[in-house]
Structures are given as structure tokens and as C-alpha cells.
């Protein structure tokens, strides 16, 4: 499996003889940052998870790791753009992007993402990632679900970000499995046989199943995947390389913190969101 570099949004800018900006970020000095913080329960306090600086990954340093990111019309860019920034900077890690028919997909807000491969042309992958979207009509189509199911069966790790977990659940991949989801949809997982968990990162079966909560949680998710696969040092390096040092101006990123009037605004455009039962196109 080869890295589909044409999909990278970051331009290669010369930094010297035979090097590029990405080379410097990927292979430059590695700095240990300390702890990585995790998410808490839907209405409870977030609990920090302290990382150990000498923690090793599940993979040998020279062992290749292949990642497939699924794309589709109506998908959310940040759901997979965040993880992509992390995964592309890990050593011996190949990242590919695929959609049902290949070529361009039109994401949420009309963003066109191009040159995806055809899902049917990909024999297998080590990790499959299904991001979420504002319209799940395309990935919920039986033909699409069949391809996701086929690739998931042979994958070592089955993952999702945001309501992409609903797609995996609809494909029958998450029966009886614990999974994260965007807070507005987390309780709908039960309708597909999965166990919705209102945390920012969730894993089951010793990490074979890993999932991130809504949209921005994809970055936290990817850093945790990086630590699990390549060890804390490489994971912390990628966090530093992209300057992932969140400092939001408001404590309104989750219903546990947001003001009631802000929650009501979301409920107005996504009825039943505060109950975790919001509906979007493609979800019955």
C-alpha cells in the first residue's frame, strides 16, 4: 500500500537541500510534552489521563502501518483532516483516501475533496477510519455499507470520528461494541446495536475498535491512536509539530459546560440533540 500524497493539503516548501517543511516537522527533533488529556462523561467532569513518557507502541519501529480514510459526499472536512495531520507525520505510516466511486467528493459546505481511490480497488488495510458528516445518505447506502463491512472485517483496527460511528454501526460492525459519537447523536447508536459512550475517546476489544467524539475530537482520537501504535514519544512529537495546544475562549464545547440558551440554539436546528437523538439525512 502506498501513500496517496496527492491528497495532502500541505504544500512541500523547500527548507534546504533535499528537505521540505513536512520533512522537518516529521523527522525533526522529538520533544516530550508530558500528559495527554482525555474526555469525561456527557454530564460529568473530564478526567485527565496521564501519559508515560517511556510508553512503547504496539508496532515495531520499522513495521509499516496502513491507514484508510473513507470519504463521501456530505462528509465533514475536520473529522478526517485533523487525524490526517497526525497520521501523515508518523513513521512508516501510509495514508490513503477512498470513496465509493473514487475521484472527487463534495463535503459539507460545498468543499470539494479530490482524487480519492475507489473502495472496491482497495484489498485491505490495517486501520479503517470512517469520519462523520452533516449528511450520511451516501455512506448509509447499502453498496457503501458493504464495502465498509468488507474492509472492516480484514482490518486490525476499526475506527470512527463523530457520527461516522453510526455508519459503522449501520454496517453491523459495532454490534455490542462501545463507541463514541458526537454528543447530539450518541444515543442513536443503540438503535443500531452499538453501545454509545459520551466520551471524547472510546476503545473496545483492547483497541481493535477506537472512536472519537464530535468533529474536533478527531485530533484527540488520532493522537491516542498514534500513541497506541507508535508510542508516546512519536505521538507527543506530532502534537507539538501541529501545535495542538487547545485554549478555547469559551467553555461551550459540550452540553456539560454550555449555557442552557446555547444548548437550546443547537436543539432548534437539530431537534432532540440534547437527548443525543438528533436526526440527519441518511439516518433512519
Image (spheres, helix red, strand yellow):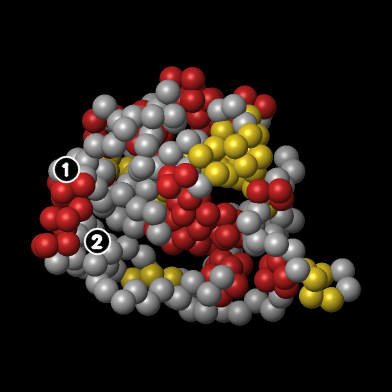
Q: Residue at x 20, y 53 (%)?
A: 266
Q: Residue at x 19, y 60 (%)?
A: 255
Q: Are marks 1 and 2 in contact (CB under 8 Å)?
A: no
Picture quadrant where residue 49 is located: bottom left
Location of residue 139 in the rendering, given as x and y in whole percent from the top left corner: 44, 30
User: Mark 2, residues whose alpha carbon is within 10 Å: few (<14), some, or many (≥20)?
Assistant: some
Upstream in the sequence, badge 1 or badge 2? 2
Q: Residue at x 40, y 59 (%)?
A: 216
Q: Nearer the viewer, residue 206 or 140?
A: 140
Q: Quadrant of the C terminus?
A: top left
With respect to residue 112, does 218 lie above or below? Answer: below
Q: Which residue is mark 2?
A: 254
With respect to residue 256, does 52 lie above or below? Answer: below
Residue 271 disc label? 1
Picture quadrant where residue 160 is located: top left
Residue 18 relative to residue 253: left or right = right
Q: Is residue 204 visible?
A: no
Amino acid at each position: 500500500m502506498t501513500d496517496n500524497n496527492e491528497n495532502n493539503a500541505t504544500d512541500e516548501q523547500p527548507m534546504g537541500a533535499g528537505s521540505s517543511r513536512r520533512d522537518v516537522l516529521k523527522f525533526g527533533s522529538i520533544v516530550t510534552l508530558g500528559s495527554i488529556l482525555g474526555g469525561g462523561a456527557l454530564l460529568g467532569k473530564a478526567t485527565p489521563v496521564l501519559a508515560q513518557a517511556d510508553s512503547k507502541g504496539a508496532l515495531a519501529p520499522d513495521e509499516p502501518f496502513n491507514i484508510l480514510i473513507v470519504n463521501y459526499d456530505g462528509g465533514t472536512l475536520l473529522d478526517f483532516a485533523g487525524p490526517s495531520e497526525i497520521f501523515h507525520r508518523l513513521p512508516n505510516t501510509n495514508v490513503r483516501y477512498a470513496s465509493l466511486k473514487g475521484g472527487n467528493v463534495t463535503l459539507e459546505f460545498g468543499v470539494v475533496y479530490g482524487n480519492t481511490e475507489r473502495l472496491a480497488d482497495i484489498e485491505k488495510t490495517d486501520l479503517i477510519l470512517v469520519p462523520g458528516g452533516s449528511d450520511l445518505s451516501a455512506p448509509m447506502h447499502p453498496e457503501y455499507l458493504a464495502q465498509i463491512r468488507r474492509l472492516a472485517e480484514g482490518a486490525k483496527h476499526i475506527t470512527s470520528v463523530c457520527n461516522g460511528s453510526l455508519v459503522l454501526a449501520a454496517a453491523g460492525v459495532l454490534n455490542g461494541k462501545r463507541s463514541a459519537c458526537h454528543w447530539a447523536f450518541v444515543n442513536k447508536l443503540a438503535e443500531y446495536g452499538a453501545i454509545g459512550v459520551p466520551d471524547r475517546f472510546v476503545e473496545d476489544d483492547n483497541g481493535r475498535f477506537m472512536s472519537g467524539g464530535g468533529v474536533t475530537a478527531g485530533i484527540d482520537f488520532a493522537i491516542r491512536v498514534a500513541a497506541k501504535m507508535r508510542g508516546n514519544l512519536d505521538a507527543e512529537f506530532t502534537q507539538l509539530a501541529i501545535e495542538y495546544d487547545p485554549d478555547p475562549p469559551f467553555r461551550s464545547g459540550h452540553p456539560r459546560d454550555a449555557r442552557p440558551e446555547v444548548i437550546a440554539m443547537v436543539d432548534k436546528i437539530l431537534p432532540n440533540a440534547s437527548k443525543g437523538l438528533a436526526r440527519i439525512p441518511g439516518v433512519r
